[in-house]
Amino acid sequence: MSEGAAAGHETVFVNQYNNGVLDPNKPMLGPVREGGHIVANTAPGCWGPMITPEIRGGHEVTVPVAVAGAEVGDAIVVRIKDITVTSLATASGNDRMMAGRFLGDPYVAGQCPGCGTLYPKTVLRGIGQSAVRCVHCGADATPFTFTNGYTIAFDANRSVGVTVDRLAAEEIARDARSYAALPENSIQNPILTFAPHDLVGLVGRLRPFLGQLGTTPSIPFPDSHNAGDFGSFLVGAPHEYGLRADQLAHRTDGHMDIDAVRAGAILICPVKVAGGGIYLGDMHALQGDGEIAGHTCDVSGTVTLQVHLIKGLAIEGPVLLPVVEDLPYLARPLSVAEKAKALAVARQWGMEALEESAPISVIGTGPDLNAATDNGLERAAALLGMSVPEVKNRATITGAIEIGRNPGVVQVTFRAPVDRLEQVGLLPYVRDQYGAG
């Protein structure tokens, strides 16, 4: 048992949210003990916070929870036990930034075009894309509107969604907070208020996951910018959260938008502040790889996590162990029959043993997909003590490079040598997820 594992709460319940900023200087909840659980009611990310300029980030994630015994240079293992959608409907689509309504970055620094107030409080007046109004002067203050958007309603079991027409979208918009099932402590304007309806009668399958799950950065970051792609927008920015390029190393890449971060997966996160500070949010009801529209179906929901510690595993960003069906075909564990065939081939060439390997997915982020891929390859090489060319070969013949989010989040997935996984302390979790190598 890790040092400090006996301390902390068995379960920490979370229904408090940040104001769009991950700040290591602010108090955390908990601590939760190692092996304990975090149960959270999450608020929608993306569009709701995007049309709420009072929120200083693109999301509204939970207040972080400390893990007892977690020290800088450790890693926290997060088992995603359950993700349940509570919203009845949501709205989303491709965005348009509204010139004159922000200072440098519409996700971070909303500004009223009428009175010039930075981070203005707003009130909703009616429905539609001009409903968000500054409380000081009454000006239309939303930093974003839709170029093409939709309202999607879910069945009672949250298994499918159907995009609805104008009349239905407007009916939902008039009771937007209820249909969104916004948690009581959420301050965002519900995006359903905009009643978008450009797509009608389109059916989508629900498979919920967390767009945000991770640990607290070691300096303040707007929550949606805790990644190498959105984080690059902070470099030299004119608002108070502007950074130097070298300060991006403080990020923890909790904003991944990887659809494999779903129930049953295991996520290993870096610890860059004492306690780690596990936070979550931006639940998506569904998403195709790449989130190419920029946004998807953001929903409220409930989440149950279990946490463990790996002492001394100093990683720069997340490592993911997806459920088997989410692994690329080439990365899936070998069956008994496949191993037998492979051993027969090896013996034909005078070899009596095969490398024992198991899947692993290392997250890389950067300003673009090329930079993100390089970042993921370098992180994987550092983690496993091998060269980048070796990682490239392994990802080519036993895995894949998958796009989490365009423009700059990828998964470098491959089968890694079991002895290397054991050396860094990951093997117990890999074995638990995939069985023998």
Image: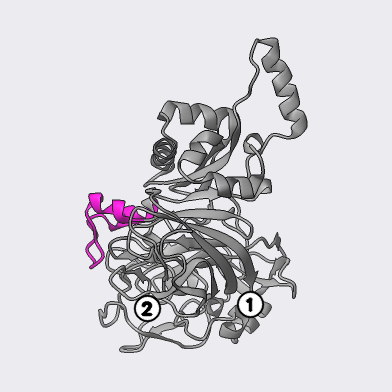
Q: In this view, does 92 lie above or below 27?
A: above
Residue 331 position in % (x across, y down): 62, 37
Circle count? 2
Q: Is 142 situated left or right of 293 in this image?
A: left
At 52% from the left and 59% from the top, the residue drawn is 78
In depth, the one of 318 and 367 nearer the eye is 318
Mark 2 highlights which residue? Answer: 141
How far is disc 1 from disc 2 in space, using C-alphas? 22 Å
Q: Quadrant of residue 168?
A: bottom right
Q: Quadrant of residue 342?
A: top right
Q: In this view, does 389 lie above or below 199?
A: above
Residue 229 position in % (x across, y down): 38, 51
At 36% from the left and 79% from the top, the residue drawn is 54
**Mark 1 packing: few (<14 Cα in 10 Å), some, or many (20+)?**
many
Q: Is 251 situated left or right of 265 in this image?
A: left
Query: Residue extending furthest top?
Result: 349
Q: Do the residues labelled 1 and 2 touch (CB within 8 Å)?
A: no
**Mark 2 packing: few (<14 Cα in 10 Å), some, or many (20+)?**
many
Residue 406 position in % (x across, y down): 48, 49
Mark 1 highlights which residue? Answer: 169
Q: Tag 2: residue type?
A: Ala
The question of residue 241 being in magenta is answered with: yes
Q: Give the range drawn in magenta.
A: 229-251
At 38% from the left and 46% from the top, the residue drawn is 366
Under circle 1, the secondary element is: helix
Residue 421 position in % (x across, y down): 51, 40
Q: Is residue 419 above or below residue 211?
A: above
Q: Which mark is residue 382?
A: none
* Residue 164 seen: no
Q: Tag 1: residue type?
A: Ala
In depth, the one of 260 and 5 nearer the eye is 5
Give the mark nearest the N terminus, 1 or 2: 2
